[in-house]
Image (cartoon, grey):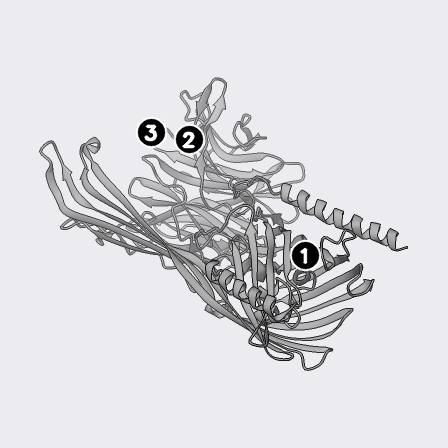
Amino acid sequence: MYSSRSEIFGGLARASVLACALAACGTLGDEPPSEAALPNRGVTPWTLVDILRGAWLSSWVFVPPATSALPAVTEPCALWQDGVHVFAAVQLGERRFIGRAASEDGMVFGAFEPVLDAADLRAPHVARAADGRLHLVAAVAPDFGRIVHAVESEDSVWRMDETPWVQARAGERLESPSLVFDADDAPWVYWTRSADGTTPRVDVQRGSDASTRRAVLEGATGCASPSGAATLCWDAGVARPDVRRATTAAGRTVYRMFYAGERGEASSIGFAAAFSPDGPFERYAFNPVLEADGRAFTAPSAVARPRDFALYVGLEGARPGVMLALDSVGAPSETW
Amino acid sequence: MNRRLGLTWGCLSIFLGLVTPWAASANPLDAFGFGPRGVAMGSAVTATARDVSATYYNPAGLALSDALLLEVGYTRVEPALTLNGVEQDVDASAGLQGGLVLPGVVAGHRVGVGLGVHLPDRRVTRLRALRQSKPRFELYDNRPQRLSITSGLGVEVTPGLSLGAALTYLSGTEGALRVGGVVHTSEPERTRLFSGMDVNLKAVRYPSFGLQWCPSRAVCLGVSERERFELALDLDVDVQGRIVSGADDSVIVERGRFFLNSRNADLFSPRQVAVAAAWTGPDHTLEADVTWLQWSAFPGSTATILIELDLGDLDFTVPLPDPPGPARYHDIWVPRVGAERRVLGRAGQNSLWTRSGVFYEPSPAPEQRGLGNSLDADKWGVSAGLAVDWVDPWGLSPRPIEFALSGLWIGLLERSHLKASPADGVGDVVSGGALVGGSAHVQLAF
């Protein structure tokens, strides 16, 4: 009996030593820490991407048209639905329409297909309501005196409201609208409001209810140069909002806004957010998130993809078009 | 053990203690425990620790060891901690553990000197100052990644009552990079700079104390106190020189200076007081501990940056980064319960022990609503272990050799950190996960 117990204990002892040795071997080597799993809410840093088109690398998602046979796109609105879908006011020669193009990788898009044959609409923005239908708002050229609304019917036909949702007051221009649905499925429309003698700002209104209209983001003031002298802020004027209702990792609702900050000819992209659709919108502390580098970045439109965030930005100037920036470091922590 | 041999061991112990680096930064041990018995019993051993682990848990117990003990083993704890449900790549804490206890008798009193070592197998110590906003598990980032050498002394003052003390020693880093010369703004290739570096590893010490009192053979009480420990990283960059321009080296600034100081308290261990009571016998121990940890003194681990720029008449300033906000940690009480029982055999013979423990550690960290992301959560710890006392049939060891295995699971309760600012760069974070570990040890007794 004692002998067998002794064998049992001896076996356990040998097992202990073996386990100790194996555990020590398992620790050989040390991999550097990775940031790939850290939370990323798609604010910064954005990296402009080059896209391989045949044998050429191109910075453009939508290329500045060299001829009138190519579509000109400057203010995209991107949506994620098993790929990236871009809505835009397209100019093809003399023809203007609201078009839709799709891409699996978000870089190379198919041709724009007309969804609304309306030559006077600009800067369409599309959002999905709780019933799954797409809604669209757009500014109306050439006077930019109103913002109109359209909804996609079950047979994929877009029907426009007879009366505009937003009507400009005297001397105002209403441009670059953006649409979101809040948690109660109520629509909120944002737009750039500009008037002579004032800097552009972002206003909001609940659907077509003009009594709820208010400013939610105004141009920044009180900036100083490194020497301490007063200077114009990079976002002295704020324009072209792109607002999305997102859900945080903790399940809260947050309203995210990318906007164009304007200072003279320079235009950079900034980020602001709010817990309520009518604000107050707080600016990100380390704006701008995409800074003008001689090019004027404007008209942002953000997409949350399964593994990263994509930000489409329009460029203005001699060669207008659309570029793509990605924020892919870390694990996406907000969805919309 | 006769009196002469005891005195010899006592003198040898004191000598070893004096020549050994007196280090006992307890952080890996705070987090996961020390020694197979301590780990398996959920660190509820303050009243009954008498082996190598007494150097950490209660040095008073060193006086009550009745044999010279040599212990060596290996421990590893693997974190599976998550942020927003995504597992983070938090480094494992692994290394050799061991030490010795040398008992003796001095002036009629039982004494014991112990040396305990936790030697990480990846890095001796890691110091790093993350930016304040970067999410990290504050208690499992740097704390378990360091060397720990514990040395203590216990004395039995009267029968049943022993006192003990230990010292902690590590080194903090103070360093300066000094650069001087001429900066040529229009022809950079003509810039000439000369540099020198001065780094000191400054000694850091702190004491810890303990008391064990056994008013009867069945009941033991224990109290131990471990002082606060802080390891600072203090670095200077000092650039001085002349700034010139043009072919004729026109002087723009005769004596410009850029000075940057970065300081942070990277490794921090709070002051701790543990109070314990145990019901014990030759074949069993049941112990309950409560430990108070003064986390309210934690200054935060983000570096404070000081920048001075002097460019003479040039009108230029460098914007200072915002100083890190206070950590706002609070003190916590950690209850622990541990038990062991001999299920096979008898004292001095082949025997098998089972051990188990449980503890609840509330988080000292507040919800991270601001810029910082120093994450932590309330924790439950469950542990278990087996120990075999094996009588060496060849007689090489006069007493049974102990082979011990222990396992540990620490679960972090899921915790949401809701940001006050909707435009926070990181946004809401949900932390959670678990740590799983174990150890294998061998202890020889003479």
> Callout 1, which amino acid?
Leu
Disc marking residue A318? 3
Image mark 1: chain: B
Residue reaching furthest to the top: A55
Mark 1 highlights which residue?
B444
User: Can residue B298 be seen by looking at this rendering?
Assistant: no
Q: Residues within 10 Å of mark 1 (few under 14, many from 20)?
A: some
Q: Nearer the viewer, mark 1 or mark 2?
A: 1
**Quarter containing the C terminus of chain B:** bottom right
Q: Nearer the viewer, residue B280 or A174?
A: B280
In the rendered image, the vertical position of residue B66 relative to residue B138, given as above or below: below
Judged from the image, the secondary structure of the residue bearing numbered disc 1 is strand
- Horizontally, residue A126 falls left or right of residue B306, namely right
Image mark 2: chain: A
Q: Which image quadrant for residue B210? A: bottom right
What is the distance, in whole Å, between disc 3 and disc 2 at their CAs?
A: 10 Å
Check contact, mark 3 vs mark 2: CB within 8 A: no
**Quarter containing the N terminus of chain B:** bottom right
What is the distance, in whole Å, between disc 1 and disc 2 at their CAs?
A: 77 Å
User: How many numbered callouts?
Assistant: 3
Image mark 3: chain: A
Residue A173: x and y in percent read: 38, 46
Mark 2 highlights which residue?
A321
> Callout 3, which amino acid?
Ala
> Callout 2, which amino acid?
Gly
Q: Nearer the viewer, residue B343 or A38?
A: B343
Q: Residues within 10 Å of mark 3 (few under 14, many from 20)?
A: few
Judged from the image, the secondary structure of the residue bearing numbered disc 3 is loop
Q: Nearer the viewer, residue A237 or B251?
A: B251
Check contact, mark 1 vs mark 2: CB within 8 A: no
